[in-house]
Amino acid sequence: MAQVAVIGAGFVGLSCAYWLMRDGHSVTLYDAQGPGEGASYGNAGTFANYACIPVNNPDVFRNIPRFLFSSTSPLRIRWGDVPTLTPWLARFLLSATPRRYGRSVNALAQLLSRAFEGYREMLTADPLAAFVRERECLYLYSSAASFEAAQPALALRRSLGVEFETLARSEIAQLEPGLAPLFAQGTLFKGSWFLSDPRGFLQALHALLTQRGLVHRRVAVETLEPAPSAVKLIDSAGDAHDAEQAIVCAGAFSARLARQCGDALPLGVERGYHVRFPGTANRISRPCGWAERGFYMTPMDGGIRAAGTVELAATGAGKNADLLRLLTRSAQEALPGLPEPDSDWLGFRPSLPDALPVVGASSRSPRVIYAFGHQHLGVTLGGVTGSVVADLVAQRAPALDLTPYSPRRF
Ligand SMILES: Cc1cc2nc3c(=O)[nH]c(=O)nc-3n(C[C@H](O)[C@H](O)[C@H](O)COP(=O)(O)OP(=O)(O)OC[C@H]3O[C@@H](n4cnc5c(N)ncnc54)[C@H](O)[C@@H]3O)c2cc1C
């Protein structure tokens, strides 16, 4: 059995640790932060096994005027950052052309169809099962026209095996009486569920793995040096460590480590926000997404979390007060009487332009394996990614074709 270094303690890193330890490997986790402090902290917590349609779908071109000029647009660009963003942005838009989009949808659907297998066994552990809420996600359309416009994407989902039910206004009111009667149509996705506290889930997983022998070094990895017999890691304190395998799961911060291993990957960041309305979780029973406004309201342990939006900007830029206001105002419109939020959060979705993660060995050495770039779906796809990474380390054939996620596809 191997000594494996896992870099990053988010959904992807901890799922990799789970599956690797299940195979009997000794795992050392490297992260200066605690479990679930990155993007894995503040997301909407949905197990969205239906979400095979990327943000950059062909409709993006039709919607550009709205994105640019509407005050309720959930997609924003920070104009000052455009020169730096342009190379990624150009590839992002190119991936929305029909042929490339079709490839991404199929490859996402392939991963999503196996997503639950990645968690099934993990969720039999009591401390983890306690965070799972088996309530299907409801996606809502406030205008009949946008529901109409969504039909091709919904038909495509159905053709790829996604099961959903369409709800009329009165059925939405019956299912979620706390919602304002704003929504003309809804879709209820079968087999989806949510977590009552994503970070709490990861803390419980981390505790479980620690009992089984996981070692967590609270340092960042600065340098990865693959050699024929081992990978050398230099940490932020300047100390060196050897591992037989290293798994790069550093989310939005993975590109630098990949470059050190011979791969210049176009990893970008889709910034997203949440606001929390304390003590309100009983107002709805499930994640309710508002399609036109690009966010979910999820009833979490501390209150409703309104999470979503996409902002294209440098990671170092400050929070966008306008988007936080939009999230707050939209949630208050959908759920009248919500109080003012008591906290907000900005997180970095790690996104490749084709909306697919990178899962595979580095160019320089099979001892370094990448597992990052899960964009809007890292909660959903963490488990299956971990199981595939364990297959690669064990040199077993994975249950799915990994070609679409190859680091060499760019
Ligand atoms: C607003 C919002 C809503 C979302 N909603 C959902 C949802 O409902 N469902 C869903 O499936 N997904 C959702 N997502 C996406 C999901 O949160 C991410 O895809 C996922 O958290 C990515 O997980 P990760 O483990 O790759 O990265 P992260 O959680 O960011 O973890 C990376 C870790 O690596 C560490 N790290 C970075 N650099 C180094 C280094 N050099 N050395 C060591 N450690 C390092 C960081 O400290 C961090 O802990 C949402 C995202 C956002 C922003």
Image (cartoon, rainbow, N blue to C red):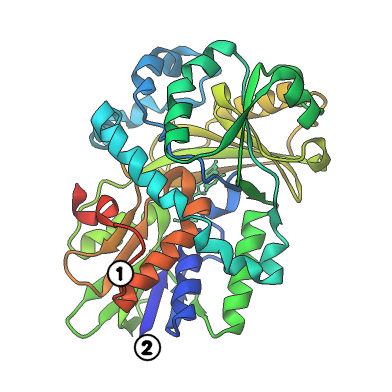
Q: Which mark is residue 397?
A: 1
Label 2 CA crowd tier, 10 Å (few <14, some 14–19, many 20+): few
| Residue 382 sits above or below residue 25 on the image | above
Tell me the quarter of the image containing the N terminus.
Answer: bottom left
Q: Earlier in the sequence, mark 2 or mark 1?
A: 2
Can residue 218 be seen?
Answer: no
Q: Nearer the viewer, residue 316 or 375?
A: 375
* Residue sitting at x 35%, y 85%: 2
Q: Is residue 60 left or right of residue 97?
A: right
Res 176 → quadrant: top right
According to the picture, the residue beneath numbered tag 2 turns out to be 1
Q: Give the residue type at disc 2.
A: Met
Label 1 CA crowd tier, 10 Å (few <14, some 14–19, many 20+): few
* Tag 2 secondary structure: loop
| Residue 18 sits above or below residue 106 on the image | below
Q: Is residue 333 left or right of residue 159?
A: right
Task: Give coordinates of residue 36: x percent, y percent.
Answer: 56, 60
Q: Give the residue type at disc 1.
A: Ala
Res 270 → quadrant: top left
Res 341 → quadrant: top right
Is there a contact, CB below 8 Å, between mark 2 and mark 1? no
